[in-house]
Amino acid sequence: MAGSTRTGVVAPLLIDNVSTDLIIRSRDIPPRAGDDCGQHLFACWRGRSDAPFVLDRPEFRAASLLLTGANFGCGSSREAAVWALRDAGIEAIIAPSFGSIFAANCVQNQIVPVVVPSSWIGDIAAMITARTTIALTIDIVRSTVVLPDGRSVRFELTTVQRMLLSTGRTAIDLIRAHSRAIADFQSRDQHRRPWIYQDR
């Protein structure tokens, strides 16, 4: 999933306050890390024949981008919610706002959390309605969403977030890459302030 762009079909889930428990129920979280969570994504809404859930509709089954309402990923800090989205093939989520811990977990799992004004959410949703499906491009380096009509809207990512998302690395990878420098610093610091290390 690493790379400087994410391009794909957009699925509209225009509901505010979608919590992590709605994304994946606690009873559906696999017992072992690394097990597939995607099969349980939005399980509470899926499987209805009378009103098919958006990701069950044929035109959106291969969607890799999700267009959502405000405060997406609110509630608990369960990282399995992000795993479920990632394992189901979601590479970026576009919303007016996110739960803060959820957004951080997205970056650590290579999902781009894209915050744009509600007016742009409405414009994108209108395009989907008019055309049935549309594809968008998320440019991570430029921090822009490029629409089919050529317009683009900027969103915010920190320098570190852009680097992690474009290279496929995690914060743990960064720490490991600087492990020698960290060890050297701790060694020098221990000689300067030994009382800090007495209980170690």
Image (cartoon, rainbow, N blue to C red):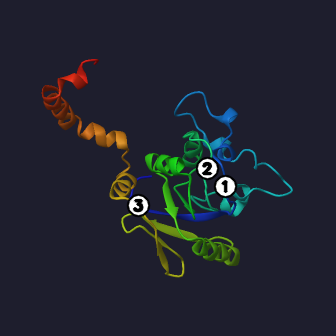
On screen, 151 above or below 166?
Answer: below
* Disc nearer the start of the sequence (3/1): 1
* Disc nearer the start of the sequence (3/2): 2
Q: Secondary structure at mark 2?
A: loop
104 to the left or right of 28: left
Q: Residue at x 56, y 56 (%)?
A: 98
Q: Residue furthest top?
A: 199
Residue 24 at what x, y percent from top left? Answer: 66, 42
* Disc nearer the start of the sequence (1/2): 1
Quadrant, the C terminus: top left
Residue assigned mark 1:
17
Disc 3 vs disc 1: which is toward the camera? Answer: 1
Q: How far is mark 1 from mark 2, CA to CA?
A: 6 Å
Which amino acid, mark 2?
Cys
CB atoms at circles 1 and 2 under 8 Å apart?
A: yes
Q: How far is mark 3 from mark 1, CA to CA?
A: 22 Å
Which amino acid, mark 3?
Leu
Q: Nearer the viewer, residue 116 or 163?
A: 116
Residue assigned mark 3:
157
Residue 29 at what x, y percent from top left? Answer: 63, 34
Q: Nearer the viewer, residue 111 or 181?
A: 181
CB atoms at circles 3 and 1 under 8 Å apart?
A: no
Q: Residue at x 38, y 49 (%)?
A: 168
Which quadrant of the structure image shows residue 157? bottom left
Residue assigned mark 2:
74
Q: Residue furthest right?
A: 50
CB atoms at circles 3 and 2 under 8 Å apart?
A: no
Which amino acid, mark 1?
Asn
Q: How far is mark 3 from mark 2, CA to CA?
A: 19 Å
